Amino acid sequence: MNRPPARSELLAGAAFLGRGLRMWITSPRLMLLGALPAFIVGLVYLAGIVVLLVNLETIAVAISPFASGWDEPWRTGMRVVTGVAVAAAGILLLAYTFVAVTLLVGDPFYERIWRAVETSLGDAPVEAKRGLLWSIGDAVRLIALAALVALLLLICGLIPGLGQLLALVLGAVLGGWILALELTGFAFDARGFTLSQRRRMLRARRSRSLGFGVLTYLLFLIPGAAVIVMPAAVAGAALLSRDVLEAEARTA
C-alpha cells in the first residue's frame, strides 16, 4: 500500500492541534483549568530567561577563554556568536522542558482534558495502568534527552556561517519530536505502553507526529502563547495518540 505524501501527513498532524484549539470554544472552563499550570510554570521560566540574559556576557566569556588572546574585532565577534548560541540553546532547553514540567505540575487538570477527548472518541481506557512514579521517570528521561539536544544545538550554533540557522532548523524538528513524545504520554501510559513502545509507534507515523509537534513547538516560542496552546496541545495529543494506536492495530 502506498504511503500518503509527507506534506499531507505533516498537515494532518498539525490539524490535530487545530482541533485541540477548538476546545477553547466547546469546553472553555476545562481549558482554563489547563491554562493555569502553564501560566504558573511560564512565570518561573520567564524569570529563568531574564537571569540567563542578564548574565549572558559573563557566560559567553567563561566558555570561550580561547578567544581572550585574539585581536579585535575577532575577540568581540566570537563572544557575540557565543552569547547568541548560549541564549538560543538556553531558550530552546526551556522550551523543551516546559511541557514536561507543566504536565507534572498540572497533571490532574491535563488528565481531565485528555479524558474528555478520549470519552468523546469512545472506547476510552477505564483507568491508568501505570503509576505516577513511572510517569515521573519518563519525564526525567525526556528532560535528559532535551538537555542533550540543547547541548548539540549549542555546538551547532558555534559553527561559523550557517551554524545558527542549522541550530534553529534542528531545534524545531527535534523539539517537535520531543514534544510529541511528552504530550502523548497520557494515552500511552493509560494503555500500559512503555516510553520505548510509544517512541516506536510514533516513529511509524513520523511525519504526522512531527506535523503536530513542530507546530506546537513553534507556537510555544511566541511569548504568552503557551498558556493558550498547552491545554490545546494535550487535547490534540490525545487525538494524535488515538490515530497512531489505531494505525498500529491495523498493521498488527
Image: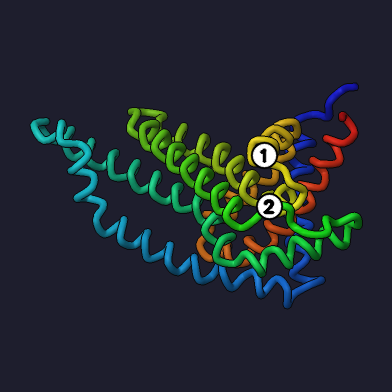
Amino acid type at circle 2 is: Arg
Give the residue at x 69% y 39%: 198
Q: Is residue 224 above or below residue 122?
A: below
Q: Mark 2 Cα within 10 Å, few/some/many (few <14, many 20+)?
A: some
* Colouring chosen for the image of the structure: rainbow
For disc 1, the marked residue is 210
The amino acid beneath tag 1 is: Leu
Q: Dot 1: what SS? A: helix
Left or right of 216 on screen, residue 146: left
Q: Is residue 126 left or right of residue 183?
A: right
Residue 130 disc label = 2
Residue 86's quadrant in the figure? top left
Please state which of the two labelled residues, at mark 1 or mark 2, is closer to the viewer: 2
Q: Is residue 7 left or right of residue 99?
A: right
Q: Residue at x 82, y 44 (%)?
A: 243
For image coordinates 78% across by 72% down, the residue present is 27
Query: Which one is in front, 65 or 201?
Result: 201
Name the mark on residue 124. Answer: none
Q: Residue furthest bottom?
A: 29
Residue 211's place in the image compared with 34, above or below, is above
